[in-house]
Image: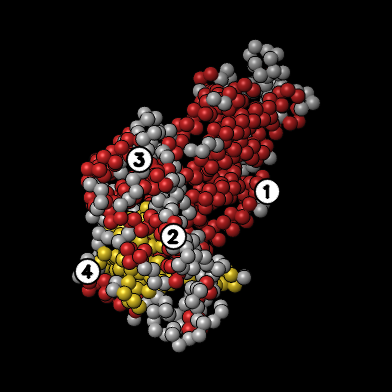
Amino acid sequence: MTAESVAEVAARKDDGKVLLELLNISKQFDVKHDGKKAKLSAVDGVSFAVRRGSTVGVVGESGCGKSTLARVITGLHPATDGEMLFNNKQLKGRRGKDVAKAMQMVFQDPHSALNPRATIGESIGFPLKVQGVPKTEIAERVARVIADVGLPAAYSSHYPHQLSGGQRQRVNIARALVVQPDLVVLDEAVSALDKSIQAQVLNLLSDLQDAYGLTYVFISHDLNVVEYVSDEIVVMYLGQVVEHSPANALYERPLHPYSQVLLSSIPNLDPTKSRRDERPDELDGEIPSPINPPSGCRFRTRCPFARDVCAEEAPERVEAEPHHFVACHLYTGKFDAQQPTAV
Amino acid sequence: MSEIVVRRLPAGFGSSASAADRKAGQRLARKFLAVDDGARPQAFWKETGKRFLENKVGVGATLFILLLAGAALIAPWIAPHDPLTGVATDRLQAPFSSGAHILGTDEQGRDLLSRIMYGGRLTLIAAFVPTIAATVIGTAIGITATMMGGWVQTVLMRGMDMLYAFPAVLLAIAVSASLGPSLANALIATSIVSVPPVARVAESATRRVVTKEYVEAAKLSGASPVKVATSQIIPNVLNDIVVYASGLVGVSMLIAASLSFLGLGALPPAPEWGFMLNSMRNSISIAMFNVMLPGFMIFLTSVCFNLASDALREATDSRL
């Protein structure tokens, strides 16, 4: 189906250069809703491939399942459905240390991501300790990675509360990198930082990517940041991928109505370039509950173009332009015959 | 900071900026972002120790306990008399009335100072052994319950609640009575009643910690649950548990003394303070001060344990 086709296309195009491949990944949580047991579908049928050495940005508003997706990729939450291929090996069940070594995560909150009772050096060295690396080598590699992220060597014996937010995020990055992973999942890695510090950390990340040949999955709600760092962008809405395309294509010509609204919400300092007048710039209402998602297209309740077909049938993902995938009935060809309906 | 340089990331990863530009910017950025200010590492327990030492009341109480512990430890060398043999003619001498028995004698003519010193051993054992046992067991239960979740948590914590439902002293009496009177059984009983509150404190502290991202990061590194517990969770719940356990020391001592007073703890002729209080009880109208002495010691020691515990609580209360 369409879900596989994305991965297939990516695989064909890159000929074995795909590092991570998600096939129809879903994650449901058991919750209590109105006193009854219910399923909250946080991630629903997500498929995309991440090429080695590239950065895939994942964007969407709060509650769209970005962070759950990050945790499913890294194995903190087991996926309830779907397949995941990493380094051409299927990830299933409890992951071994070899996967832990190859896949790391940088967390959002620099304050809670570091053990307050451990020194910076201990925190960074912990993944190595788990891997069973000898002590002298740990010390050496920790010192090297601390230098890599631009911190003074003396900070190794300091505690997290003695560092600023930006410095702590550097430590988090160092901890992720010390095992020399292939893939780093960055979950809102710069969102908690000041703008100026954000720029520094983003520069650092790009330098490190060049130096170590890292692959990033960069999850953020900040479209400016994602635009700068990403090669490809995945737009998520209510647990589903609505659009997936090269970064410049998305920013130049977003296809999905949701992406259009999302991009028009970026404030533009240049009035002549403002996109406010061209596209719908405001969404009606709140994001619907993932416990009872709307039928058909999940975005239809807030979509200015919604028709009957949107409620009846979930749009399949189509390649509307080369490498530019979108899941919307505007592009499936099922739209023209329908009359507009008020939703 | 006048030289803040914020480079906008060029689209496509620095294709427009030269490598030299980038390196220069990076150097500048690092210079003001992360300067080694020469600050010393601030380890939590070291800082807590410093703050504790600034608390005069806490230090005073601790010194008293250390004094008592020291006296109890070297009692065989410094005690003026044998605590177990008395002289019948010297019964119930008032404190400070004779040079031979500074604190007087009990109803069998045994030197009270010596008995108090030796009794300090039993008291300190009764204070610390159940506390340490309950802390270790309770912490293990609380952390296991929270980390495992599900039915394990339900079984463990509701089991604790069942023990909690009985008043502590009553439960201790019941356990002690069923095991038979002896100091060891009194210690077991005291330990059992102290486990549920420690488990609760450990559970709530663990629940606060277990969702933190550093715990997730540790799991991501491939660490086993035991490794996660020992490296990430215990160091971060320890302060809550230690503060709570320090308050338990005084309580344990009181429960053990109560059990001894009721004849369920130390057996005669052991110089246990609670038991001494009981055996001299009948003489209260003749020698009030002699009878009050063990009671006063129990009171004073218990107060000191609590004052030290409060000081510790204040000392750990920081943003670290």
What residue is disc 3 on? Answer: B5
Mark 1 against mark 2, which lies toward the viewer? 2
- Mark 4 neighbour class, 10 Å CA radius: few under 14, some 14 to 19, many 20 or more: few
Residue B276 is situated, as x and y percent measured from the top left of the image, at 66, 31
Element assignment for label 4: helix
Q: Chain of mark 2?
A: A
Secondary structure under tag 2 reads loop
> Mark 4 = which residue?
A14
Amino acid bearing label 4:
Asp
Of B113 and A254, the residue lying toward us? A254
Of the numbered discs 1 and 3, the one sitting upstream in the chain is 3
Left or right of A336 on screen, residue B32: left
| Label 4 – label 1 distance at C-alpha | 70 Å
Quick check: marks 2 and 3 in contact, CB under 8 Å?
Answer: no
Residue at point 50% right, 32% down? B48
Q: Are marks 1 and 3 on the same chain?
A: yes
A244 with respect to B127 (left or right)? left
The residue under the point 72% across, 18% down is B94
- Tell me if B163 is positioned left or right of A265 in this view: right
The location of residue A53, given as percent across then percent down, is 25, 59
Q: Nearer the viewer, mark 4 or mark 1?
A: 4
Q: Quadrant of residue A105?
A: bottom left
CA gap between label 2 and label 4 equals: 36 Å
User: Do the residues at pointers 4 and 1 share their chain?
Assistant: no
In the rendered structure, which amino acid carries the disc numbered 3? Val
Q: From the top left corner, tell me how far across and down residue A342 is, in percent.
A: 56, 79
Q: Which residue is mark 2?
A: A274
